[in-house]
Image (tube, grey):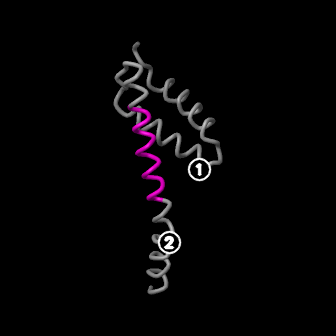
Amino acid sequence: MIAAVVLAVIISVATAPAAAEENTIRRFCMAAFEAAMANAGLTPPEGMGTFTCDCFLEQVSQGADLNEARETCKTEAAQRFPLDS
């Protein structure tokens, strides 16, 4: 039992920096998404920003470079959330 608790603590401490880094990336992603939508004069559908940033984080964690992840997720979000111009 104690070994399981110690293992859980070690895992949570080891993943804390990764979680903090992911949170920072997510905040930057959402800020960039909101700025891009505002600059385009568009109001994104609810959930589009979260979907796009979740996609971006997933793509990067799977080894995609930043530009590739951005383009992949931009395309997927546009297909899932059509925007009225």
Please, what is the three-letter code of the amino acid marked with disc 1? Ser
Local SS, label 1: helix
Q: Residues within 10 Å of mark 1 (few under 14, many from 20)?
A: few
Please, what is the three-letter code of the amino acid marked with disc 2? Ile
Q: Majority secondary structure of the magenta segment?
A: helix
For the C terminus, the image quarter is top left
Q: Is residue 23 magenta?
A: yes
Residue under label 2, please give it.
11
Depth check, front residue: 49 or 21: 21
The answer for how far apart the CA atoms under marks 2 and 1 are is 18 Å
Dot label at residue 85: none
Q: Nearer the N terminus, badge 2 or badge 1? A: 2
Q: Are marks 2 and 1 in contact (CB under 8 Å)?
A: no
Residue in the picture at 44% in, 85% down: 1
Q: Position of residue 25 (x, y in %)?
A: 47, 48
Residue in the picture at 52% in, 40% down: 55
Residue under label 1, please give it.
61
Q: Position of residue 56 (x, y in %)?
A: 53, 41
Local SS, label 2: helix
Whether residue 39 sits left or right of residue 56 in the image: it is left
Q: Is residue 63 magenta?
A: no
Q: Residues within 10 Å of mark 2 (few under 14, many from 20)?
A: few
Whether residue 46 sits left or right of residue 5 in the image: it is left
| Whether residue 11 is situated above or below residue 32 in the rendered picture | below
Furthest residue in direction bottom, as rendered:
2
* Magenta extent: 19-34
Residue in the picture at 48% in, 63% down: 17
| Whether residue 45 is situated above or below residue 12 in the rendered picture | above
